[in-house]
């Protein structure tokens, strides 16, 4: 445990890579003369997480030894559990200009300075290995594989000094750092905190499992992902409206906190579930909800593979407790939310709608059944679909 009785960060210490103002001013002057490395959206998200300590104990993008250790063994070279490589791939021209031992300027897609990296290593980006080991497929129809395969063939690694974790960040009032969430947990007297990862509006099944988890923990962190997602996912601003309404009407504010996670979705299923748990450990959470098909996409992963993978990791080394929930639904027979564990109802007695069916209903301006989603949430989604058909 760390100070104030909160769970210790992964590796024992919360990393902070953000340069002090005086140092940042010096770096800005130097950066004007440096080789510029434009980061993709995934890498911009990763840089922000690195800078604030959400990816502790990492202090920069991974080198070759870390990459292969993570892909092959789901561990960092020091033995600490880690499931997804955090890389800085660059194209051939940039790789040739970036010299080992020299600093380079990391910039966003508008050429705005984010950080300075002192290049310690240049190593091949084994994209096929990453796809096979992390995503379990090389199919470029998989959105995470598509991003990986489109990246450069060389990766840069080295110490980072961050000037601006992100320019013009979305939801700045809710973009809490791990240090800030930990301070709030301490202020509220929470020793056990459960995190809920989501990239969708919270429907009744999600509401049920978060409240079940809250019964055994002091607090609940609703932690929606607002970084890079794929086309077809509901926009973050619409989701935030849904979360605000739900939290205002259906949760106890004393035991619930919402913050956003500026991470890129990789859709890596089981491997990403482990990464999402480690992130929440760094934010100060002791428990992490792992539901059906966590971080999945299409039919690339088995329904409960994201839960089973936690059995492959040393619980003491991981340090955060996964809460594994069955698929839940409204049970007409019970008159309540239920799962296969808690009801003997027939399929016909269960309210279950596919994502396609829900989207079709919303597009027609129809509210899905109240047993599936709160009417206030349905109205926000209907309005959004009318505005952006």
Image: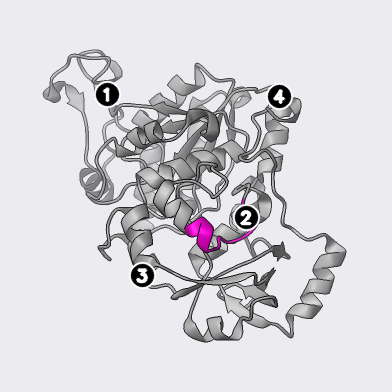
Q: What stretch is highlighted in magenta?
A: 58-67
Name the residue beneath numbered marker 4: 5
Q: Which of marks 3 and 2 is nearer the N terminus?
A: 2
Identify the residue at image location x=66%, y=33%: 8
The residue mark sitting in front, 2 or 1, is 2
Q: Element type at marker 4?
A: helix
Find the distance from the CA under tag 3 to the CA under tag 1: 41 Å
Q: Residues within 10 Å of mark 3 (few under 14, many from 20)?
A: some
Camera-nearest residue between 327 and 142: 142
Vertical order, 312 against 386 (above or below): above
First in residue order: circle 3 vs circle 4: 4
- The residue shown at (61%, 47%) is 54
- What is the distance, in whole Å, between disc 4 and disc 1 at their CAs? 38 Å
The image's mark for residue 149 is 3
**Viewport quadrant of the N terminus:** top right
Q: Residue at x 30, y 38 (%)?
A: 305
| Horizontal arrangement in the rendering, residue 183 relative to residue 130 (left or right) | right
Q: Earlier in the sequence, mark 4 or mark 2?
A: 4
State if disc 2 and disc 3 touch (CB < 8 Å). no
Evaluate if marks 4 and 1 touch, with contact meaning CB atoms under 8 Å apart: no
Location of the C terminus (image quadrant): bottom left
- Which secondary structure lies at badge 2? helix
Q: Which mark is residue 50?
A: 2
Q: Is the magenta stretch mostly helix, strand or loop?
A: loop
| Tag 3 and tag 1, C-beta contact below 8 Å | no
Does 321 sit left or right of 118 as displayed?
A: left
Q: Where is residue 148 in the image (x, y as percent from the top left)?
A: 39, 66
């Amino acid at each position: 445990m760390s100070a104030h009785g909160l769970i210790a960060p992964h590796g024992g210490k919360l990393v902070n890579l953000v340069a002090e103002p005086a140092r940042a001013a010096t770096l800005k002057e130097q950066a004007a003369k440096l080789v510029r490395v434009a980061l993709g959206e995934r890498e911009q998200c990763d840089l922000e997480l690195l800078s604030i300590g959400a990816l502790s104990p990492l202090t920069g993008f991974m080198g070759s030894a870390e990459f292969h250790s993570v892909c092959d063994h789901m561990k960092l070279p020091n033995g600490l559990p880690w499931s997804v490589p955090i890389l800085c791939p660059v194209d051939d021209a940039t790789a040739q200009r970036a010299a080992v031992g020299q600093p380079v300027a990391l910039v966003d897609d508008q050429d705005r300075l984010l950080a300075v990296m002192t290049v310690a290593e240049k190593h091949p980006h084994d994209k096929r290995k990453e796809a096979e080991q992390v995503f379990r497929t090389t199919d470029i129809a998989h959105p995470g594989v598509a991003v990986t395969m489109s990246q450069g063939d060389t990766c840069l690694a080295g110490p980072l000094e961050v000037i601006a974790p992100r320019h013009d960040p979305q939801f700045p009032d809710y973009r809490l750092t791990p240090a800030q969430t930990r301070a709030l947990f301490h202020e509220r007297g929470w020793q056990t905190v459960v995190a809920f990862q989501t990239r969708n509006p919270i429907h009744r099944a999600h509401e049920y499992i978060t409240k079940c988890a809250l019964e055994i923990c002091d607090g609940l962190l609703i932690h929606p992902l607002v970084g890079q997602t794929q086309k077809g996912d509901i926009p973050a601003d619409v989701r935030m409206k849904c979360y605000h309404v739900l939290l205002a009407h259906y949760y106890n504010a004393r035991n619930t906190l919402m913050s956003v996670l500026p991470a890129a979705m990789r859709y890596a299923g089981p491997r990403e579930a482990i990464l999402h748990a480690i992130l929440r450990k760094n934010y100060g959470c002791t428990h992490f909800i792992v539901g059906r098909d966590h971080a999945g996409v299409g039919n690339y992963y088995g329904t409960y593979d994201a839960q089973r993978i936690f059995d492959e990791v040393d619980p003491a080394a991981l340090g955060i407790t996964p809460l594994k929930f069955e698929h839940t639904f409204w049970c007409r027979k019970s008159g309540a939310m239920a799962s296969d564990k808690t009801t003997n109802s027939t399929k016909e007695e269960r309210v279950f709608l596919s994502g396609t069916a829900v989207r079709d209903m919303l597009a027609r301006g129809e509210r899905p059944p109240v047993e599936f989603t709160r009417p206030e949430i349905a109205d926000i989604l209907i309005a959004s679909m009318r505005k952006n058909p």
